[in-house]
Image (cartoon, rainbow, N blue to C red):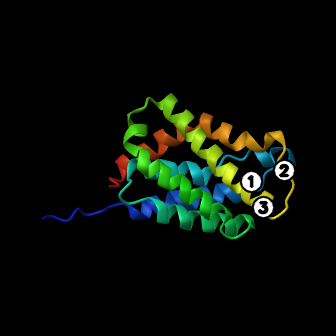
Amino acid sequence: MTLARHHGGGIILLTFVVALLLTIVPLPEWARYARPDWVGLVLIYWCLALPDRVGVITGWFAGLLVDLVTGTILGQHALSLTIVAYLTQRLHQRIRLFPILQQAFTVMILLILHQLLALWISRIIGRPGAPWYFWAPSLLGLLLWPVVFVLLRNMRHRFRVR
């Protein structure tokens, strides 16, 4: 029995660090709700590309880091990204067969689920409901998925991440 050697763990970590940095980059007040869910997009990509390496535990750690850098309730994003990672990991064989446009819609549904879970937790602690533009990050994820997918796939092939 041979053991597969994993390469490129640093590249995976680097993409999550960049996603976290893009999450905390200051934006003008009018664009605050138009920030894409970078960490969610990166997590979904790596769960699709390498489901044996990136999954639920990675989603939990990524969510905790998002909670820390954004100042939300500790565990809010951790729970929702864990569920998104689990669903992506369970459905990765189907999603990978979809054309890129259908993948983008699937990613949007996963990002909406992430937002719904985060909104649910916010409502439990008594925060007010979200305005209509609360859903903009999921719609932006739909539009950005083809670009994110191609960039990360090219990076994965270039650095032979497996």
Ranked by sequence position, the earlier of labels 3 and 2 is: 3
Residue 86 coordinates in the image, percent (x, y): 48, 55
Disc 2 packing (10 Å; few <14; some 14–19; many ≥20): few
Residue 144 coordinates in the image, percent (x, y): 59, 38
In contact (CB < 8 Å): disc 1 and disc 2: yes
Numbered disc 3: secondary structure: helix
Q: Quadrant of the C terminus?
A: bottom left
Q: Quadrant of the N terminus?
A: bottom left
Q: Amino acid at mark 2?
A: Gly
Q: Amino acid at mark 1?
A: Leu
In contact (CB < 8 Å): disc 3 and disc 2: no
How far apart, in angstroms, are the residues tagged by discs 1 and 2? 8 Å
Residue 136 coordinates in the image, percent (x, y): 73, 40
How far apart, in angstroms, are the residues tagged by discs 3 and 1? 9 Å
Say whether residue 117 is left or right of residue 3: right
Residue 13 coordinates in the image, percent (x, y): 48, 63
In this view, which residue lies farthest toward the front? Answer: 124
Query: Relative to 135, is 21 above or below?
Result: below
Say whether residue 30 is left or right of residue 18: right
Residue at 79% of width from left, 51% of height from top? Answer: 27
From the image, tell me which residue sits under label 3.
Answer: 124
Ranked by sequence position, the earlier of labels 3 and 1 is: 1
From the image, tell me which residue sits under label 2.
Answer: 129
Numbered disc 2: secondary structure: loop
Q: Give the foreground label among 3 and 1.
A: 3
Numbered disc 1: secondary structure: helix
From the image, tell me which residue sits under label 1.
Answer: 119
Disc 3 packing (10 Å; few <14; some 14–19; many ≥20): few
Residue at 50% of width from left, 30% of height from top? Answer: 102
Residue in front for this viewpoint, 27 or 44: 44
How far apart, in angstroms, are the residues tagged by discs 3 and 2? 11 Å
